[in-house]
Image (cartoon, helix red, strand yellow):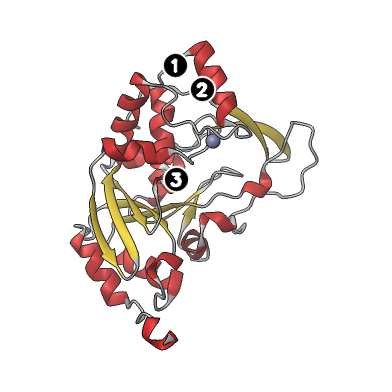
Amino acid sequence: MLNLLRKSPVTPAELDAGLAELGLDGSQHVIVHASLKAFGYLEGGAQTVVDTLAARTATLVAPAFTYRTELRSPTSPVHTHFHRDLRVSREIGRVPQEMVERAEARRSFHPMLSFIALGAEAERVTGVQTLASPYQPIGALYDLDGCALLMGVDFGSNTTIHYGEHTAGMPLLTRYVPLGGQVVPTAFPNCSADFGRLEPHVRGRSTRVGGATLRLYRVRDLVDATVRLLSQNPEALLCTYPGCRCQEVRRLVRQQGLTPRPHLPV
Ligand SMILES: [Zn+2]
């Protein structure tokens, strides 16, 4: 009985066919968010995802966030220093970690919110990040008319929306991170738990590979739809969980409204 329920493994060729169906032909600059579990059993795991995607994209980007570098205050003791090979937080997933383990990948400097990139525009994408605009690599993808690929994950993992919030002018919180022997402030956004509310406002392409739904969106569509939605209702993407930092952002946006930070090509 159990054997009948067991699905056959997903092969690299099936994954490649799915990516082709979405229109990925090796010319696009893509930020990926993937859950390996969603496929069922994928032959070769994260390595297969990175190899297959790298062959189907010009540039492959992923968030490689490391939340354990976050400090409560400027005077908090530093336990973890950021470095090029620091392990990606578990909740960000195995795929970015696989990219970090490839020596040719470029990792941006941000101690907590770094991005990892492979391919033609890796240097450009990772080079534009600042402490005041940690999601600026998405801005580089906007200029490159790049795409966001969700593999078996929902909009809660769709980091591109944070850049839309940034340009729309959502208030940002302050967090502290160790950098170059000092502790420095960095901008930090609300959470992404309710980003699904953007879904009805943006159109993408989708297909299935094994148990996973793959969805591809233009970064420009996601960012522009976020700006439109927030200009109508600045609280639209904030979650309602009482203990979440979203409530602090809600208070700020009610006091100050939006302060747009328009996207400027670099
Ligand atoms: Zn929240």
Which residue is drawn at the image coordinates 58% and 58% (left, top)?
A: 90
- Answer yes or no: disc 1 within 8 Å of ligand 1: no
Q: Which residue is disc 2 drawn over?
A: 171
Residue holding disc 1: 259
Residue drawn at x 46%, y 59% as measured from the top left: 105
Residue 165 placement (x, y as % from top left): 42, 29
Mark 1 or 3: the one toward you: 3
Q: Residue 207 location, x and y as percent?
A: 24, 60
Residue 214 is left or right of residue 92, and the answer is left
Q: Nearer the viewer, residue 154 or 171?
A: 154
Residue 156, labelled with which disc? 3
Q: Secondary structure at mark 1?
A: loop
Residue 103, relative to residue 107: is it above or below? below
C-alpha span from label 3 to label 2: 19 Å
Res 58 label: none
For the residues bearing labels 1 and 3, Cβ distance under 8 angstroms: no
What residue is drawn where x is 55% and y is 30%? 246
For the residues labelled 2 and 1, the Cα–Cα distance comes to 7 Å
Amino acid type at mark 3? Gly
Can residue 263 be seen?
Answer: no
Q: Quadrant of the N terminus?
A: bottom left
